[in-house]
Every structure is written in C-alpha cells, then in structure tokens.
Amino acid sequence: MSEYIYIAGDSPLQTGAVGDKPRLTKDSIVVYNTVTDMESFYFEENRDEEGEYFSFSPHFSLKKYQVSSLEVHLPQVGDKMIKNSQKKAIDQLYLYIKDYFERSVATKLEILFCLNGDEENTISFRKDVAFSELKLTDLYYLERKFLTITK
C-alpha cells in the first residue's frame, strides 16, 4: 500500500505535475539537475472511466472537486529534522494550497493523508485551520489525518 494525499475543494483543483523543475525539455527528453528537481506531486482528478465524478473518501464534505497524489517525501509528524526532498515536498504542497486560494473564489480545502485503500477508515487526527494560520508542520504526513483549511 502506498501513502497518498487526497484533496477536496469547493472550486476546481490543479491537476498534473506540481513541483518538478526540468532544466531542459527537447524531443520528449526531459533533463533535471538533481533527483530532487525531478520529484513532484502528480494530482489526478476523481473521475472514473466514463468521466463521472466520484468521491475518494466519505470523510470529504466537498464532493465534486477532488484530486489525489502519491505522497512524495512529506515529512512524518514528529520528525525533528527533514531532508531536502522533504522540504521541497512540504513547500510545494503549501504553494499548491496558497495558489488554490489566490487563483479562485475558493473558501475551503480538505486534505486526507492515508494509505491507498484506507480512505474509508476512521480518522486518527482532525484539525481545522485558517490558511492565514497554517503552519508547514500542519502538512506533515500522519496516517488518516484530516485537515480542513479555510480562506
């Protein structure tokens, strides 16, 4: 099972790669300076094969706009020191959230951190926070953590 982050919002969410920094792209060849530059979240929408929306988790109150991504090196709750790849991941997730609130009329975002397949299991930790009060440590990975962020 893989660690995932699931995000639900009240406005459309960005999909695709978030955080990769290619140095050169030519003829389908992509070159990166470092492995860390290559790593990124890749957000996919909550649509089935027929293009219909579905909810990733019954815990989400926001049903239509949802995305998911493999968790890419987020620090774990309790980590005292973090590696460069973890710093990049946490910064990219924070910037994703910031961009979401800045580019849309969005007022609310929900994030579920859990193993793929555990989306329906009981929440282990729940927190509500205003974006202006959001700390990077709020975005650290904890299995079945549910975070609600308001504008």
Image (tube, helix red, strand yellow):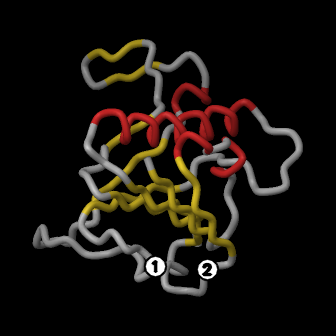
Task: Return the residue at label 1.
Answer: 59
33 and 89: which is toward the camera: 89
Give the image quarter of residue 126: bottom right
Q: Determine the residue positioned at 60% across, 39% down.
A: 89
Mark 2–mark 1 Cα distance, whole angstroms, equals 8 Å
Residue 135, quarter of picture: top right
Tag 2 near tag 1, CB within 8 Å? yes
Q: Which mark is residue 77?
A: none
Image label count: 2
Q: Residue tagged by mark 2? A: 123
Q: What kind of residue is marked 2? A: Ile
Dot 2 alpha-carbon crowd within 10 angstroms: few under 14, some 14 to 19, many 20 or more: some
Residue at screen point 41% across, 82% down? 58
Relative horizontal placement of residue 104, taking residue 121 as reference (left or right): left
Image quadrant occupied by the N terminus: bottom right
- Relative height, residue 126 to residue 65 (above, below): below
Q: Where does residue 48 sit, x and y in percent of width and height?
A: 21, 72
SS class, disc 1: loop
User: Identity of the amino acid at label 1?
Assistant: His
- Front residue of 97/143: it is 97
- Label 1, residues with CA under 10 Å away: few <14, some 14-19, many ≥20: some
Q: Residue at x 31, y 48 (%)?
A: 106
- Residue occupying image coordinates x 52% and y 44%: 131
